[in-house]
Amino acid sequence: MNGTPFPRAPLQAHARTPGVAPAAAPWDAEVRRILCVRLDNMGDVLMTTPALHALRESAPRRHITLLASPAGAAIARHLPDVDDVIEYDAPWSNATRSPASGDEAALLAQLRAGSFDAAAIFTVYSQNPLPAATLCFLAGIERRLAHCRENPYALLTHWIPDREPHAELRHEVERQLAMVRSVGARVTDARLRLRVSPAARATLADKLRMRGVEPSVRCVVVHPGASAASRRYPAALHARALDLIAPAAPGPIVLTGSLQEAALTAEVSSYMSAPTRARVIDCAGAFTLAELIALLEQAALLIANNSGPVHLAAALGTPVVDLYALTNPQHTPWMTPHRLLYRDVDCRWCYRSICPEGHHACLRSVPPAEVARAAHELLGYAPPLPARAVVPVHIV
């Protein structure tokens, strides 16, 4: 190194790195209108619902607005603690979207008009909250809360230094609950929260009857898709596992997925034995999100990759066999009976959408017999059909 070296190197990266949350005023009863920012996927939004509930219940007349991606906005309409939703496709999260579209100017105008008292920015530890914090700062939102690894300066008024994953590692639910506790939120219920539509139960029943399935029969739901290729168990292995599960299944096996995933569910079916195929109903593209929620509510079991339906099932108390690619350790099923299946690999926690090593061994090495064994164990204590409680929610 040129120049004169110092005998001791800095231990901190910036001028102010508190070891705990800064001593800032908690959010009292004057903080009524809160903007909650969660710009990633459906499952991430669901894992934030205990924190949303804690914020809402910690002071009278709290109003929660969720700023969410298109996927997050879709599920937000089924969350009992969300009053309003603003949909925003952030260009730093979606590389295909140009920031020159004028969306940011329109969003800033909408945020200013919202008269928010505070903003809570929810991120996983691999994300940076500062782009969203900048929007909230420019919108004039007085209080701005987030985890942040680097010094946010004036962008955050309530800064929690991010110590994950190098110093600690928490489930995503625990991470967000800790964040809202720092501003005085009281946590009385840590369960995921989800509303099931009575209308969706009725339309689901009609669609099942059209396919020869009595709605009262508890089915096994299999969701073989995932938004990233690195999180998909191979179709042929899915099929072999279902060959082993089908003889003991309490009802039909229902394959689910979007219309775009119809080719994947057809591929899974093509690898099955004929007797298994006779018990399988391919419903890719057949259900709305509300109907998928209603289906998972009455299901005996869900078998899926680490994807949004896993967290839907967890919110409903439905048992889950989770084929868990080692891309991120924070997103396991929360407070529901489950089995987590994977193989440990040196490239664990890659955070990649496509396996960087090309072998996909963390999932490909899980044998179908292990999937079947996990399913049989969970089918032994599938919960009874839940009470039909509905919480009204106002969405504009």
Image (tube, rainbow, N blue to C red):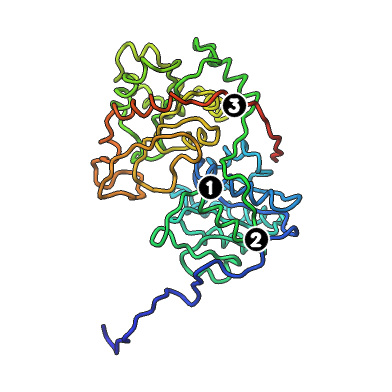
Mark before the other along the chain sequence, 3 or 1: 1
Question: Which is in the foreground here, disc 3 or disc 2?
Answer: 3
Q: Secondary structure at mark 2?
A: loop
Q: In the picture provided, is 62 more to the left or to the right than 188?
A: right
Q: For residue 293, what is the image quadrant?
A: top right
Mark number, residue 89? 1
Q: Nearer the viewer, residue 374 or 233?
A: 374
Rendered position, 217 above or below 142: above
Q: Amino acid at mark 3?
A: Pro
Rendered position, 245 above or below 214: below
Residue occupying image coordinates x 44% and y 44%: 331
Quadrant showing the N terminus: bottom left
Residue 204 placement (x, y as % from top left): 57, 20
Q: Amino acid at mark 2?
A: Ala
Disc 1 crowd, CA 10 A, few/some/many (<14, 14-19, 20+): some
Mark number, residue 386? 3
Count all numbered tags in the image, as a single digit.
3
Residue occupying image coordinates x 67% and y 29%: 389
Mark number, residue 139? 2
Q: CA distance from mark 1 to mark 2?
A: 17 Å
Residue 107 placement (x, y as % from top left): 62, 53
Residue occupying image coordinates x 72% and y 58%: 31
Mark before the other along the chain sequence, 3 or 2: 2
Disc 3 crowd, CA 10 A, few/some/many (<14, 14-19, 20+): few
